[in-house]
Image (cartoon, rainbow, N blue to C red):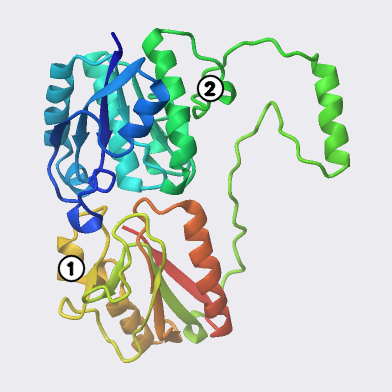
């Protein structure tokens, strides 16, 4: 008899649709759907996806308590040997759902769980609580992700001890596992030093945390002569979101002219952000992008001028690397325009 597995996926991988169908409520399907086929093939009959739970990313984000309750009920009824979610790659809301559903199944039902996603996915914050296989940042990495997840899943179902994260492919969860190296430490250290001296790639055995540091610029001596720009990760865009900035995991930013605009009205502007309640931002977009106050400062001479353009994107689930890329691009535009300082608002 093969092991029983319940699989969780979102609306995209269930072939229901993309962002326009992210509102779909949870549903239970018999057997495998989408990426579940790759898992079944990797297990070669030793395990089988007996049921697939599908839930829209937006639905889970907006109805997390209800979604969890329904999913836990279905999982309990299936009596699985393992619950697996994703892989979510770099889809922020999907990754959040995968990690949190896994945590709930593990804590409340005592069923082994596993998920997979890109290391910068917000769901990866739970790597110290649930096992998360590290994947590429897009679904193009499915060919490698599915076998890696299937292999680790089989270990869990058989009750075999896990190796170190570097051996079994899961994200470092802070738990150290002892194992014997083939070569003694002195020799490994010398080999790393030789590689370093010869500009060859090497990997440290004791990686240190990497903290980004941005050195502050010198203070502006006279704000009354300064040109100030305003930017936001809160998703404020012209009505209708003309550049189709995604509500999560944004792939681009928008550049919009506010020359002559005294205030952001609800008739002309809205938020594209999918990670917070948009009601108050849509009622008064200045709450997120304070054009009205900056215009007052401009008239009172507190600042010299408000820059004619603002730059906006959605921070919800957006990869750090993407955010840096956006900033590097429009920061150059701001410098070329003679902007002295930027006010960056979030939510």
Choose between 342 and 205: the one closer to the eye. 205
Q: Is residue 214 above or below residue 162?
A: below
Seen at 28% across and 15% down, the residue is 111
Residue 145 on image: x %, y %: 46, 35
**Side of 259 where 24 appears, left or right:** left
| Disc 1: which residue | 282
Q: Residues within 10 Å of mark 1 (few under 14, many from 20)?
A: many
Confirm or deny contact between disc 1 and disc 2 (CB under 8 A).
no
Residue 73 on image: x %, y %: 12, 23
Seen at 28% across and 8% down, the residue is 1
| Disc 2: which residue | 168
* Disc number placed over residue 265 in the picture, else none: none
Marks 1/2: CA–CA distance: 47 Å
Which of pointers 1 and 2 lies earlier in the amino acid sequence? 2
- In this orientation, does residue 63 appear? yes
Q: Quadrant of residue 209?
A: top right
- In this orientation, does residue 138 appear? no
Choose between 123 and 12: the one closer to the eye. 12
Tell me the element at label 2. helix
Q: Quadrant of residue 8?
A: top left
Q: Residues within 10 Å of mark 2 (few under 14, many from 20)?
A: some
Choose between 28 and 187: the one closer to the eye. 28
Choose between 58 and 212: the one closer to the eye. 58
Seen at 84% across and 18% down, the residue is 186
**Side of 142 where 94 appears, left or right:** left
Seen at 24% across and 16% down, the residue is 80
């Amino acid at each position: 008899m093969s092991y029983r597995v319940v699989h969780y996926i979102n609306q995209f991988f269930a072939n229901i649709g993309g962002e326009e169908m992210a509102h779909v409520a949870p549903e239970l399907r018999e057997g495998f759907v989408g990426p579940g086929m790759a898992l079944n093939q990797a297990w070669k009959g030793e395990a089988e996806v007996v049921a697939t739970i599908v839930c829209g990313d937006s639905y889970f984000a907006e109805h997390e308590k209800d979604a969890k309750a329904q999913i836990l009920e279905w999982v309990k009824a299936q009596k699985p040997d393992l619950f697996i979610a994703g892989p979510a790659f770099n889809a922020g809301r999907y990754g959040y759902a995968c990690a949190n559903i896994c945590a709930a199944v593990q804590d409340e039902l005592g069923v082994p769980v596993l998920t997979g996603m890109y290391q910068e996915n917000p769901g990866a914050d739970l790597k110290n609580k649930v096992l998360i296989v590290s994947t590429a940042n897009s679904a193009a990495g499915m060919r490698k992700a599915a076998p890696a997840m299937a292999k680790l899943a089989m270990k869990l179902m058989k009750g075999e001890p896990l190796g170190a994260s570097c051996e079994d492919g899961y994200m470092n969860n802070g738990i150290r596992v002892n194992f014997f190296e083939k070569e003694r430490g002195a020799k490994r250290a010398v080999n790393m030093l030789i590689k370093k001296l010869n500009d060859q790639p090497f990997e440290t055995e004791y990686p240190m945390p990497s903290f980004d540091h941005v050195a502050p610029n010198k203070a502006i001596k006279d704000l009354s002569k300064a040109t100030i720009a305003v930017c936001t990760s809160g998703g404020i865009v012209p009505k209708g979101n003309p550049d189709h900035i995604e509500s999560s995991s944004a792939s681009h930013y928008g550049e919009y002219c506010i020359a002559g605009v005294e205030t952001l009205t609800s008739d002309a502007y809205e938020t594209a952000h999918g990670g917070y309640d948009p009601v108050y931002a849509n009622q008064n977009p200045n709450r997120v992008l304070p054009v009205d106050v900056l215009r007052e400062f401009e008239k009172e001479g507190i600042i010299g001028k408000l820059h004619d353009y603002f730059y906006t994107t959605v921070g919800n689930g957006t990869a750090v690397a993407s955010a840096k890329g956006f900033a590097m691009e429009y920061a150059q535009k701001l410098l070329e325009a003679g902007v002295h300082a930027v006010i960056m608002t979030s939510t």
